[in-house]
Amino acid sequence: MKKLALLALVAALATSCSDDETSIPQEDLQLATPALHMRVSTASGESPFTGVLTVMPCQPESSIYFGNYVNHRLTPFYGYYMVKDGEFYESSSNRELLLPMGDYNMIYWGTPKYEEPIYSNPAVREPSYSIGGDLSQQAFSLLKMSNDTTYYPVYDLVHAVQNVNIGTDELIASLQRVVAGIKVSVKNQEGSALSSNIESVVIGITGIARELDFYTGQPQGDACTVAFPLVRSVDGTEMTNGTVMLFPSYGNPEFQMSIKLKNGTVKRFKQTLKSPLVANTKLTLNLTVGDIFTGDVSGDFTMEDWKEDNENIDVSIIE
């Protein structure tokens, strides 16, 4: 649950909500809390959703935020659920929807729980929420690293929009993943331990959209470069990362690798990938290197693009 709480940060921070609260006598309204059932669509089909889910009720057939009743007041604090196998479970973190009966347009955003390792330091800039505000004018945005031109990877994000009648309908939606995943593995050609001269390896992926439209989940904004480090394995034979989540790319992104040696030398490599990074896809890059890490020897390495295809790509050195 500790890791889940970290992944949920994108959804859990309600501090961006404005303080606008509307005092409407609750006894004059027929309020209801809908049941909830969620599934996630993937390339291999659908599976029950497990993770953190936020639900933003909007006015019917629109993206105008209605709000949610909390402590007998209409507030900008959205619904927040801890979900396991598609059903929400009791948790002190939950903030259920409580709404007047009638029609709404629900916007769902979720962060799934992962069993396999994923990147441990994602970050994202949240939208703001105000009653009567247009959520189609809001976005999730990349966060820029301090003193750098690159940006942090993001959380795994799933999204859906659904028209619902509170009082008759349950919240049943198929959530769509709106980010891409990438995993990088660097090994020696002969499978031996990587050079002890390597101090650090940082990966950069260019052409990544700066934002996701909050209402549609579609990429928008300027093209940015997202960066993340690789970590050496315990046996020293591999440098890799937990799966990194990125907003989709504009066209085919450029893969960049910066290798800092202990003698202060920095070697840089780049290669344009053969496919865009699109939502709900995961790219695994297996890089095999020779003797380029020792001394001043120049060289190249091969990269298998889309592991399933076992495709080799020659990568040139950046001077």
Image: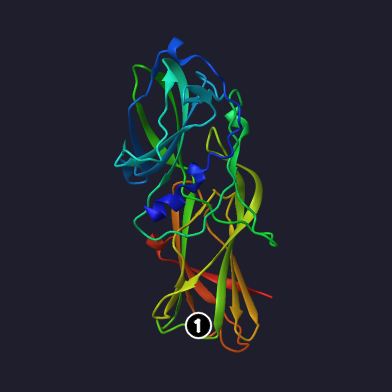
Residue at 40% across, 51% down: 4
Query: Could you tell me which residue is drawn at 56 percent across and 80 percent down?
Result: 199
On screen, 149 above or below 186? Answer: above
- Graded by Cα atoms within 10 Å as few (under 14), some (14 to 19) or many (20 or more), the crowding at tag 1 reads some
Position of 200 relative to 12 (above/below): below
Q: Position of residue 257 (x, y in %)?
A: 58, 69
Q: Is residue 285 above or below residue 124?
A: below
Q: Say which of 17 and 285 sits in front.
A: 17
Percent position of residue 59, x then y? 52, 20
- Which amino acid type is marked by label 1? Gly
In the rendered image, the quadrant that contains the C terminus is bottom right
* Residue 254 percent across, percent down from the top left: 60, 60
Residue sticking out furthest to the top: 28
Residue positioned most to the bottom: 295
Across and down, in percent, residue 66 comes to 53, 22
Residue marked by disc 1: 290
Regarding mark 1 in the picture, which secondary structure is present there? loop
